[in-house]
Amino acid sequence: MSQEFKRCLKQGKIKHFTPGPKLAYKELRLAKEDLDTSFKSLSERNYKWSIIQSYYSMFHSARALLYSEGYREKSTFV
């Protein structure tokens, strides 16, 4: 486990999440849908939306990785 990951755990930015592994597949499916839509937007020269959809694809992929290991992100607002 990296020092950065340990720091995020200590700060509460990442938390243990028991149902995570069951939800990882759902997140991967969402990531694929967003990526497919991004390619469609790109082919239509709708660059701004292609970038946004690509971002969400990466977000869902990262979330799937965390979920598969039994963790979740915890957004904190000040």
Image (cartoon, rainbow, N blue to C red):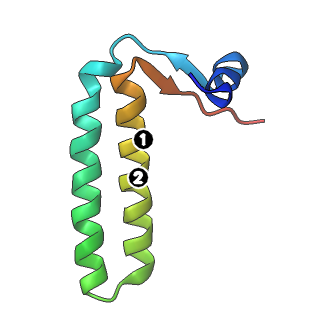
Instruction: Quadrant for residue 43, please give it.
Output: bottom left
Residue type, numbered disc 2: Met
Judge the density around disc 1: few (<14), some (14-19), many (≥20) Cα neighbours within 10 Å.
Answer: some
Helix, strand or loop under label 1: helix
Q: Which x, y percent locates residue 49?
A: 40, 74
Residue 58: which numbered mark, if any?
Answer: 2
Q: Is 10 on the left-hand or right-hand side of 35?
A: right
In the rendered view, does 30 fall on the left or right side of 5? Answer: left
Q: Quadrant of the C terminus?
A: top right
Residue furthest to the right: 78
Instruction: Determine the CA span between mark 1 and mark 2.
Output: 6 Å
Q: Is residue 27 above or below residue 69?
A: below
User: Can you give x and y, in whole percent of width and height, for residue 74 in the image?
Assistant: 58, 28
Rendered location of residue 15, percent (x, y) = 55, 18
State the residue position of label 1.
62
Question: Do labels 1 and 2 touch, CB within 8 Å?
Answer: yes
Q: Viewed as shown, does residue 73 lie left or right of 41?
A: right
Residue 34 to residue 45: above or below: above
Taking the spot 46% from the left edge, 20% from the top edge, the residue there is 71
